[in-house]
Image (spheres, coloured by chain):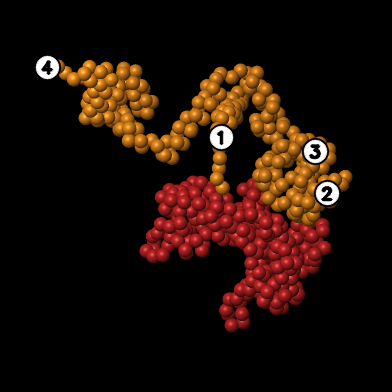
Amino acid sequence: MKLPGWTREPLVHFLAAGAVIWLVLGWQGEPVDPASRTIAVSADDRARLALQWERTMQRPPTDAELDSLTEQFIREEVLYREAVRLGLDQDDAVLRKRLAGKMDYLAASMAETAGVSDETLQGWLDKHPERFAPDVTYSFDQHWFADREAAARAVRQSEPVGETISLPRTMDKAPRSEIEKQFGLDFTEALDKLPRTDGWQGPVASGYGWHLVRLRARDAGPVPQLAQIRDQVEADWRTETASARKEEAYQVLRGSYRITIDR
Amino acid sequence: MIGSTDSHTSLATGDEDNFFGKHTGNEPNANRALEPQNLGTRQGRFGWHYLAGGYAAVWARANTRAEIFDAMMRREVYATTGSRMVVRLFAGFDFSDADWNGDWVRAGYTRGVPMGGTLADEGKAPTFLISALKDPDGANLDRVQVVKGWVTASGETREQIYDVVWSDMDKRAKVGGKVPAVGDTVDRAKATYTNTIGAAELRTTWTDPDYAAGQRAFYYVRVLEIPTPRWPLYDAVRFGLKLTPEAMADAVAQERAYSSPVWIGPAASGQTEGGQTQALFDRNRLSRNKGRG
């Protein structure tokens, strides 16, 4: 028997082979990555589980307990992989927050773990003595105005006159807490930032309205030696540096996005 | 005279924007504002009926235990619903607006009596120096009221409320004997308010227009803030909760301060007013010393 000529064409062979592969795969369903169906619990994993247990319970787990921990770990892993397969990780607000938090953590981790030199901390202490001095005091005079414009006009006079209110015109060597009690938090924080000068400054906002302030003295008082408060300075430096790094890293990433907001 | 929490949380979180609940069972959560509270009653009491708390204030000469107890024994105290307002009240017979130009607190103590004091009737209407300064981290002040109480000849108790000083007095004239409402800046959707209405400080010299010679009466001061959100509104915003209409109608309120009264009555025979007060102080000191054994 002689086969027709077209059966010898390479193109036909190619198409037929293709059809067979397509049929077989179609019948088998979705291809399975064998690796994603294997859960290998390594000795390292078990050691980590044992360590976590020990941190909570203050003793190592027994063999039975470790086996039960391993079972729990496997259960979580199976459910986790299936959840990802089903796409349950999409549009989940908690996961989004958690992952975003991990990015922040990565950015800040250098500041969290890096050893810090005494020079850096001494510099930090010199820059922010008021944070570590137990009794910073302020001496200042103030005039109160109900509205901002009146205060802004008065600040140009050499001896401004304020409006009447039951607030002390002048405070001498008053601790921060005392000023906060009398003038409120906004005013006290503004006072921290005012430069020490002989003239009137302002308008400075408070809960009462607006003030002109003549900051006569800001006395940080005796600042403790670094050696005595190293932990406190280090914690403060870490917190501030970490949040600065987070913000820096975020700004770099954000810069690479084109963002449109419909309003 | 008391302003306080009745909470069982060991926390000094006395205000609307940080209310941590009356007890551990209603720490902040999405349900507490609308849950029924059946403590003792079986009907009609809900979470939002509860107030966040308040403060008691004492005019002591020093921050010592003895001075604070002395001040409480002479009743020189006031209370608030949670704001830290500074309230002064002095009663006498010869105060005038000119006193505000000088050291009026000294004038108040030397020519009159402070809140909690007793004033011997001198046959003319008493005059009061009243001053209220807002909480620097809180809301502005709407108005100051004097509440007068007395007993009629037939034995009935009466009270009369006078609006004595209020913010923007030139623009808020009394209508039918009443001061119009100060307004409302509370954004119900965000639980915020602005200090664009009201005043930072209110003070006045007030003389009782309805004085009756020989009548025993008390006068106390009430200071009202502009409307601010109550804790159920903060809860509603925080937890995306929809309040019931009754709860919503009560979600904004005017916090206030209320002083100890000054009492006025006929002078006891042979005793001046100063003598009376002195006698009162002596009695207090005596009872305290007794208490110490």
**Residue A154: which numbered mark, if any?**
2
For mark 4, what is the residue?
A1
The residues bearing labels 2 and 4 have C-alpha atoms spaced at a distance of 116 Å
- Chain at tag 4: A
Which x, y percent locates residue B49? 47, 60
The lab-note entry on whether marks 4 and 3 share a chain reads yes
Could you say whether the residue bearing mark 3 is in a helix, strand or loop?
strand
Helix, strand or loop for disc 1 = loop
Residue sitting nearer the eye, B144 or A106: A106
Label 1 resides on the chain identified as: A
Whether label 2 touches label 4, CB < 8 Å = no
Depth check, mark 4 against mark 1: the one in front is 4
Specify which label sits upstream in the sequence, 4 or 3.
4
Question: With respect to residue B83, does A2 lie above or below?
Answer: above
Please name the amino acid that badge 4 sits on.
Met
Chain coloured orange in this rendering: A
